[in-house]
Amino acid sequence: MKELKEISKQNPFKVPENYFEEVNRKILSETAGIYPGRIRKSIIIRLRPYLAIAAAAAILIVLSYTAVRIFVPDKFKPGVPVITVSEFSNNYLNEIDILTLEQNAESASLPNVASGYTSNDIIDYLVFENIDIYDIYKYL
Amino acid sequence: MGSTNPENDISEFLKSDVNKGFRIIVERYSSKLYWHIRRLVILHEDANDALQNTFLNAWRNIGDFRNESSVYTWLYAIATNEALALINKRTRNTALSLDDLGSYFVDSHEGSTWFDGDEAQKKLQNAILKLPEKQRIVFNLKYFDDMPYEQMSRVLNTSAGALKASYHHAVKKIEDYLQNG
């Protein structure tokens, strides 16, 4: 008996004459009367118009922000004025400073303050708690 | 819309003109699919039914074709399932096993009308029919259609490694049958 590799791979089965032309015609005529399943596009293609709108909006926002930053002078920009540490110490601390606070604290009567706390302890506490110097000034 | 890969052309046609795309699919693949089915079900009438069901199924589910595999792979998967469904139905209705049917077909006079092979090819067909169902499919796809394992894995939803092992076992069994059967 022949080995597998020696046996012809040629198709041993037969079909009626013109079978494939006829079956193709039959398949196409049968499916013509049936509505096909809807072709689904990939999710990227379906989202493409929305992605385009989102991208355009993002570009517009970035351009607007950049334009404001470049063209609008600082003095027109709202918000809390920024001052440097040297400006603060030169302009504000000269009026009221920690030493003055310390002197006033010593002479002030501080009700309900436990004994044993020095002025330095109190000032250290105020600084540590980040108490606004304007608040302190208000109460003096 | 043209591209060097004919599969891409079909996919493009399916999206832009589904009727034209489907006609191309039928004309291009009906023969290949028919022979794949025929080697599984043996009888021409059964293969004819399964082939038409395959394309009807494909048409109805053409929206599910997502281009994740090729049209060819997708159709082969549908055709394989149609052939298996038909075999199972026949087994339930006739209580005739496939290798009984195959032996009858290749040896009988009626069978000889639709079988044109020599003695060696007859024996090969009998040997193939004795394989378990899934192994028979693997052997046919590899031996006759020369389908790559990676593509076969998408058709049969099985790993390429498992398919390789299955094919080698099938070849061994067939060779034993040819020598000793």
Image: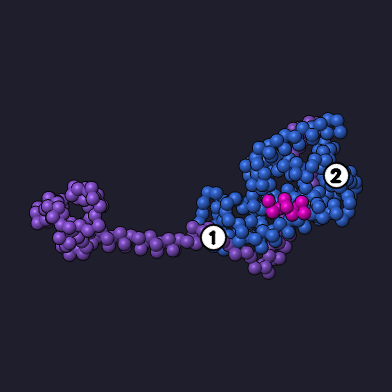
Q: Quadrant of residue A133?
A: bottom left
- Residue plotted at (65% across, 41% down): B159
Any idea which chain is the purple one in this picture?
Answer: A
Crowdedness near tag 2: few (<14), some (14–19) or many (≥20) residues, C-alpha within 10 Å: some
Q: Residue at x 75, y 44 (%)?
A: B134
Residue range in magenta is B77-85
- Considering every residue shown, the one lying at the far front of the view is A115
**Residue A73, x across and y down, in percent:** 16, 61
A93 magenta-colored: no
* Gap between marks 1 and 2 measured at Cα: 44 Å
Chain B rendering hue: blue
Asked whether, in this view, residue B44 is left or right of residue A132, the answer is right
Secondary structure under the numbered disc 1 in the rendered image: loop
The amino acid sitting under disc 1 is Lys
Which residue in the protein does label 2 denote? B99
Q: Quadrant of residue A27?
A: bottom right
| Colour scheme | by chain
- Say which chain tag 1 marks: A
Determine the secondary structure under disc 2: helix
Residue plotted at (76% across, 52% down): B83
Residue reaching furthest to the right: B109
